[in-house]
Each structure stands twice: as C-alpha cells, then as structure tokens.
Image: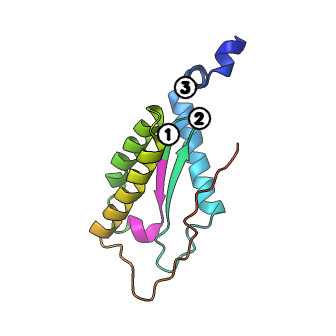
Amino acid sequence: MLAVLATPSWRRLLVGRETLERRVRARAAQAFLDEELFATRERTGVLLFVALFERRVEILCDDGVRKLVPEGTWQGIADELARGLRTHQAGPALVAAVERCGILLEAHGVERRPDDADELSDRPRILDE
C-alpha cells in the first residue's frame, strides 16, 4: 500500500479524474484572485495554471479577454500543454502554449496599445500545496 501511495500515477488514479479536475479548477481560480490578474486597465489578465501532480492545465481569462475570445478556444492550448506534461516535455510544451496564447489574443483583437505598460509580472510562480 505504501508503494502505491508513493507513486504519483497510482495516487492520481485513486483520487479520481473528477476530483482532480475540480481541485485544479478551484486552485486556478484562487491563484487568479491571489495574483490580482483582474487588476489591469483593460481587464486582459490571462492565467495559464499548470498543476504538475495532476498533469492538468487551466487557462483563466479576465472579462476583457472573455468578451473577445470565445470560451472554448483555450481548451486546445490547455490540452496540448497537459499532453506535454504527461509525456515529460513540459518545457517545450509550456513555451508553445505561451506562444499560442499570444497568437490567439492578437487574432481576436486583444492588442497592445502604444501607451500600454506591463501591468502584471510575467515571471512564473511555483505554489506548494
């Protein structure tokens, strides 16, 4: 039993898919609030939340982005990044996901204005829970 509990893949199976997804969504929503991604002039904050243990990804957007980018549009990016996590290609998958997010935002009219300032930090945050 200890060997099963010590192995992440077995622990994920024991917890169950729905529980993992619910926990990741809740933690992503909390991170969005904690990092104040809503505090931009045009409400264009985007959170790319990567849950390493669960190998799941949530992409959350503020109102300014949600008005321009259809809701389901982000799922393909999240799925590709999650696949990269599962196949031990997290680094390249993360870089590709960030690039695809930028392309998607630009394609839907979320653009930088000449007087824009970088209102949010771009540095990754690692949360231990």
The amino acid type of the residue labelled 1 equals Arg
Residue ranking furthest to the left? 107
Q: Which residue is mark 3?
A: 16
Residue 79 percent coordinates (x, y):
38, 42
Question: From this viewpoint, is residue 69 visible?
Answer: no
31 or 18: nearer the viewer: 31
3 or 1: mark nearer the eye: 1
| Left or right of 32 on screen, residue 112 | left
> Could you classify mark 1 by the number of other residues whose Cα lies within 10 Å: few (under 14), some (14-19), or many (20 or more)?
many
Residue 118 percent coordinates (x, y):
52, 77
State the extent of the magenta-drawn residues as a range. Answer: 58-66
Contact? badges 3 and 1 (CB < 8 Å): no
As drawn, 78 above or below 33 = above
Residue 8 percent coordinates (x, y):
60, 25
Q: What residue is rendered at 31% in x and 69% in y?
A: 106
Q: Which mark is residue 53?
A: 2
The amino acid type of the residue labelled 2 equals Phe
Check residue 123 for magenta coloring.
no
Q: Secondary structure at mark 2?
A: loop
Q: What residue is rendered at 38% in x and 52% in y?
A: 96
Residue 61 percent coordinates (x, y):
46, 61
> Could you classify mark 3 by the number of other residues whose Cα lies within 10 Å: few (under 14), some (14-19), or many (20 or more)?
few
> Could you classify mark 2 by the number of other residues whose Cα lies within 10 Å: few (under 14), some (14-19), or many (20 or more)?
few
Q: What residue is rendered at 48% in x and 66% in y?
A: 62
Residue ranking furthest to the bottom? 115
Q: Quadrant of residue 124?
A: bottom right
Spatial CA distance of label 1 from label 2 is: 8 Å
| Left or right of 8 on screen, residue 65 | left
Image quadrant holding the C terminus, namely top right
Q: What residue is rendered at 46% in x and 84% in y?
A: 116
Contact? badges 2 and 3 (CB < 8 Å): no
Q: Which residue is mark 1?
A: 56
